[in-house]
Image (tube, helix red, strand yellow):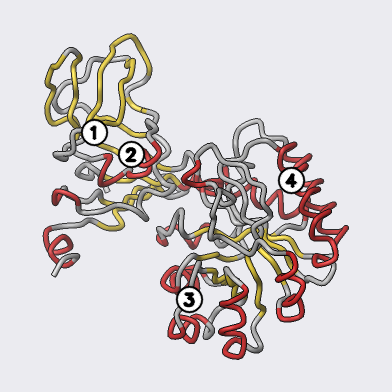
Amino acid sequence: MSHAHTPYYLIDENKLVKNLEIIRHVREQSGAHSVLALKCFSTWCVFDLMRQYMDGTTSSSLFEARLGHEKFGKEVHAYSVVYSAEEIDAVSQFADKLIFNSVSQLKMFHDRVRGLKVGLRVNPGISYSHYDLADPARRYSRLGVCSEQELREVAGFISGMMFHFNCENDDVENLSVALEQIGARFSTILDKMDWISLGGGIFFTKDGYPLERFCAILKNFSEKYGVQLYLEPGEAAITNSTELVTTVLDVVHNEIDIAIVDASVEAHLLDHLIYRTNPRISVPAPGNNRMMIAGRSCLAGDIFGSYELETRLKVGDEVRIADSAGYTMVKKNWFNGVPMPSIVVRRLDGTVELIRSFGFEDYAGSLS
């Protein structure tokens, strides 16, 4: 492919492999298996590559679980905050591990899932998160079982537990202390389990992360309680692998020069609006020209951010938004009818492949 019309998400498999090699190293050194968190990244055109390094997928809904089963293969961990009876019957046909969020749902559906490896999500009452919105142990959290008494009563019905209590945790010592606290609090129940998932949100592919220390912590926990550990990397699996490639369509001035590109934060990078963060710009390079970069939707706050750039942007210039894989393509939407970015992959051999483009029929078909 010689040219793709902007906007498009560009996934670079060589950058992706850098994360995947770390995931494989952690598996080899710690024994912990890794299952891809589809809630973060579900773009299955690169699953052929990812399955060479990972053990399967984990989900937050029936559709995600089915996608993992059909497009990724290997292990399917099926978790949902809540299941309907119909969803339980459907997901039971292909899930390897079925994880309930509450004791009440476990009791309600236990007879329907006999023969499956069943687990419970546990809220340990501790967490690491920069944002209250994403804190799984926030006050009144509905995510996981809080009562040790309830856990003990149903321990005979489950073979594993999930402790998903991190969000962008890059502090290995914080994780070590947290696992010690979990071990001390739940030791008598852990001894009865075959497997434990530590969920996602552990940023172990970050540059400079103390991997050997991390592996030792995981291995020690696994051996102490005699369990198979699972990690659920989402962002850690795909960080820095993808850019949102855009083109400047106009430049306006209101105290500051504002370059308007052919993409939208609201429609294409929604998490940055939700968490009030600004993405990095990979092209142009940093410099001394201060400009704001904005999206094309009618939302007043559709702003990527203000940046100091190497060049002063003009109509027709390319702008690349860095680190645009996690929680982007899974959340993209048709707000304002703004054209959806295509999906493009640069393969390991350097060839560039247009995987999917979206047009008016896709927009109309998403409505009624």
The answer to which of 298 and 48 lies nearer the viewer is: 298
Could you say where residue 232 lies in the image, as x and y percent from the top left? 60, 56
Residue 178, numbered label: 4
Marks 3/1 in contact by CB < 8 Å: the verdict is no
Lower position in the chain sequence, tag 4 or tag 2 = 4
Distance from label 4 to label 2 (Cα)? 30 Å
Looking at the rendered image, the quarter that the C terminus falls into is bottom left
Other residues around mark 1 within 10 Å, as few (<14) / some (14–19) / many (≥20) = few
**Mark 4 is on which residue type?**
Ala
Residue shown at 44% from the left, 70% from the top: 67
**Mark 3 is on which residue type?**
Tyr
208 to the left or right of 258: right
Distance from label 3 to label 4 (Cα)? 29 Å
**Mark 1 is on which residue type?**
Gly
The answer to which of 179 and 35 lies nearer the viewer is: 179
Distance from label 3 to label 1 (Cα)? 36 Å
Distance from label 1 to label 2 (Cα)? 8 Å
Reading the image, the residue beneath label 3 is 83
The answer to which of 193 and 7 lies nearer the viewer is: 193
On screen, residue 187 above or below 292 = below
SS assignment at label 2: helix
The answer to which of 195 and 358 lies nearer the viewer is: 195
Residue shown at 45% from the left, 48% from the top: 349
Reading the image, the residue beneath label 1 is 301
Marks 1/2 in contact by CB < 8 Å: the verdict is yes
**Mark 2 is on which residue type?**
Leu
